[in-house]
Image (cartoon, grey):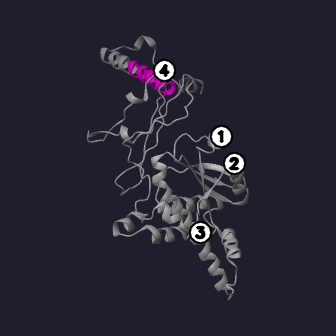
Amino acid sequence: MAPFLASLDMYRKVPVDLLEGTKRGSIMSTLAIMSMATLFFLETRAFFSSSLSTNLALDSNTDQNVRVNFNITMMDLRCDYATIDVVSVLGTQQNVTQHVQKYPIDQYGVRQRYQQRNLKQHDVQQFDATVEETIEDLHADGEDAISLDDTTLKVALESNTYVFVDFFANWCSHCRDLAPTWETLAEVMYEVAENKVEDNLDKHNLKHDYTDADYDAAVAVELPVFIGKVDCVDHPALCQNYMVRAYPTLKMFVDGEEVGDYRGHRTVVEMAHFIEEMEKEHKGKDRAVETSGAKDVASDRTIHTREHQEYAE
């Protein structure tokens, strides 16, 4: 029994003196060690290295122009020498400098007061060409865009949820071009309020027996957005307080707080759409908005051709 147990060994090994190395085995072992070392080095370097990747994704868009916002600060380069080229995937190169807004900065990187806007910049419509009335014609029955100063602006912000203000200078040609559009926008908002008052009267089967003053007061209560304007020549301190650096500057206020400047096309329909979107953002998309009918009224006031209709849609 003892010899049998001694011969039973499941872990036998070949003596070292019987092992013999071969040239092929040495080459394969050397290549394996070099491959593992190379992979270890490359993986370690990739783990500790960093890279910057930027992707720009655009939704499907049928418009002729695409607006892209970017911010590049160069401390030692004059605005005159800053140019922007766009190169497509096909290699087509286009200079778009004339559509770029530039601001001078001081030695500390602080943006200066006046905006270096390109004279040939045509990416934003400066006024609504479909408004055919002059500012004098629009003012014949009174001003709907209310002129404001420091005191009346505070009252307007306290009394209205939504306030849209045009900060302008009376010597500015762009401001004079925008004036009929801005007054028309104010008239559109007044007409929306009038329609709501009339709808409320019809809903309760009431007759219109208001005095003119009472009717105007009722319309003022239903006014979806207060449209105002500030002449920065007459009220420079007020405009400086709101950081107005270019004329005209259109600012939106919600609940007395400034929420930003309007930078879209300065047409009545576009601005009515902007006001509606600001109200939706403030109230929430699930709640009804007071300015929902403003675009329809604006379209009726300004759209005269099929081209205008297609643009509004």
> Which residue type does callout 3 highlight?
Tyr
Label at residue 150? 2
Identity of the residue drawn at 50% across and 71% down: 296
Q: Earlier in the sequence, mark 3 or mark 2?
A: 2
Residue where numbered disc 3 is placed: 190
Q: Which is in the foreground here, disc 4 or disc 2? A: 2
> Which residue type does callout 2 highlight?
Asp
Q: Earlier in the sequence, mark 4 or mark 1?
A: 4
Q: Which is in the foreground here, disc 4 or disc 1? A: 1
Q: Residue 154: horizontal and vertical position, in percent?
A: 71, 52
Q: Residue 274: horizontal and vertical position, in percent?
A: 53, 58
Q: Are marks 2 and 1 in contact (CB under 8 Å)?
A: yes
Q: Are marks 3 and 1 in contact (CB under 8 Å)?
A: no
Q: Residue 117: horizontal and vertical position, in percent?
A: 44, 39
Residue where numbered disc 1 is placed: 237
Q: How far apart are the two marked residues, 4 and 1, measured between alpha carbons?
A: 97 Å
The quarter of the displayed image where residue 223 is located: bottom right
Which quadrant of the figure contains the C terminus? bottom left
**SS type, badge 3:** helix
Q: How far apart are the two marked residues, 2 and 1, measured between alpha carbons?
A: 9 Å
Q: Which is in the foreground here, disc 3 or disc 4? A: 3
> Which residue type does callout 4 highlight?
Lys
Residue where numbered disc 4 is placed: 13
Q: Is residue 218 left or right of residue 175?
A: right
The answer to whether residue 4 is above or below residue 239 is above
The answer to whether residue 68 is above or below residue 179 is above
User: 10 Å neighbourhood of mark 3: few (<14), some, or many (≥20)?
Assistant: many
Identity of the residue drawn at 34% across and 18% down: 25
User: 10 Å neighbourhood of mark 1: few (<14), some, or many (≥20)?
Assistant: few
Asked if residue 153 is among those painted magenta in the image, a careful observer would answer no
**Range of residues picked out in magenta:** 33-50
